[in-house]
Image (cartoon, rainbow, N blue to C red):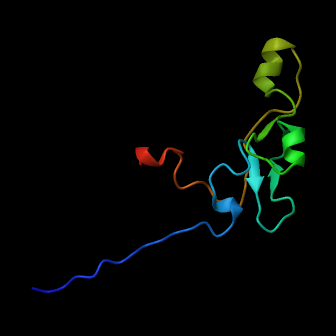
Amino acid sequence: MKRQELGYYWLAPQNECDVYGTCGPFGSCNALSSPICSCLRGFEPKNLEEWGRGIWTSGCKRRKPVLCDRNNNTGGGGKEDGFLRLPFMKVPIFLNRDPLAL
């Protein structure tokens, strides 16, 4: 009978930005920056007190409502909303935070 050896496979994040949700919704993580989290253009920290302490998981919120909301509610016009191109942005591999659901 041939003896088989059991191998181990271990994977760990290389930096804080490899952890899903580090900067929360509408946040961007850059391990080479200090602080590592920032809000996407048009957004601001949802909880300034937490962001000041380095707790970024609450993410960011819009500075202004989207154009369709402004038109429906206040009749305001202005520049149209659209999508922002984010080159070199790494997206999460696992969208579900529950490891048991994988």
Viewer can see residue 88: no
* Relative to 33, 95 lies left or right: left
Image height check: is 21 above or below 11?
above
**Residue drawn at the location 89% of the way across and 28% of the way down:** 78
**Residue drawn at the location 89% of the way across and 19% of the way down:** 76
> Residue 36: percent from the left, percent from the top?
81, 59
Tell me which corner region of the image, top left, top right, bottom left or bottom right, holds residue 50: top right
Q: For this rendering, which residue is in front, 24 or 41?
A: 24
Tell me which corner region of the image, top left, top right, bottom left or bottom right, holds residue 97: top right
Image height check: is 24 above or below 36?
above
> Residue 86: percent from the left, percent from the top?
73, 55
**Residue drawn at the location 58% of the way across and 54% of the way down:** 92
The quarter of the picture where the N terminus appears is bottom left
Image height check: is 75 above or below 55?
above
Q: For this rendering, which residue is in front, 26 or 70?
A: 26
Which residue lies most toward the bottom here? 2
* Relative to 76, 2 lies left or right: left
> Residue 102: percent from the left, percent from the top?
41, 49
> Residue 29: percent from the left, percent from the top?
75, 57
Image height check: is 68 above or below 59?
above
Which residue lies most toward the left here? 1
Viewer can see residue 70: yes
Tell me which corner region of the image, top left, top right, bottom left or bottom right, holds residue 8: bottom left
- Numbered disc total: 0
**Residue drawn at the location 76% of the way across and 65% of the way down:** 31
Q: For this rendering, which residue is in front, 20 or 10?
A: 10
